[in-house]
Image: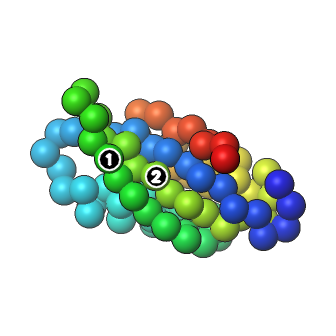
Amino acid sequence: MGAGARAHVRCRYPRDGEEPARRAGQGGGAIAADGANIDGISMDEDRSAYTNMHFTLQVADRQHLARVKRGLRRIPEVVRIARVRD
């Protein structure tokens, strides 16, 4: 991962009646606070009690991505974060 690299991150939220737009706003706020750009957001719901939110990010390097992931982990509702490899 080099300068201006793209990363795909998946966050897993419990489906608890909260608005999906609010969840995206929480994640987007945490990502922006760590200085990353959001290139795309998508969401899918499986048959479990969780919603998966996918963020495509522009980050500087691996360390920058690690900071962004730590920021997302600080959101109490996030139960899992994973980098999705292409």
- Give the percent coordinates (x, y) of residue 1: 83, 54
Q: Amino acid at mark 1?
A: Asp
The front one of 86 and 43 is 86
State the residue lying farthest toward the top. Answer: 48
> Residue 65: which numbered mark, if any?
none
Q: Is residue 65 above or below residue 47?
A: below
The answer to whether residue 70 of the structure is visible from this angle is no
Q: Quadrant of residue 58?
A: bottom right
Q: Position of residue 13 (x, y in %)?
A: 34, 40
Spatial CA distance of label 2 from label 1 is: 8 Å
Residue 54 badge: 2
Discs 2, 1 touching: Cβ within 8 Å: yes
- Label 2 vs 1, first from the N-terminus: 1
Quick check: 26 left or right of 39? Answer: left
Way the structure is coloured: rainbow
Name which quarter of the figure residue 12 lies in: top left
Q: Residues within 10 Å of mark 2 (few under 14, many from 20)?
A: many
List x then y, in percent, for residue 11.
45, 44
Q: Nearer the viewer, residue 11 or 30?
A: 11
Residue at the far right: name it.
Answer: 2
Residue 18, image x and y in percent?
Answer: 18, 50
Residue under the image location 39 percent in, 58 percent down: 42
With 46 as the anchor, is 60 left or right in this view? right
Numbered label attached to residue 44: 1
Q: Residue, x 32% and y 47% (percent of image)?
A: 44
Q: Is residue 51 left or right of residue 75?
A: left
Q: Residue at x 59, y 52 (%)?
A: 8
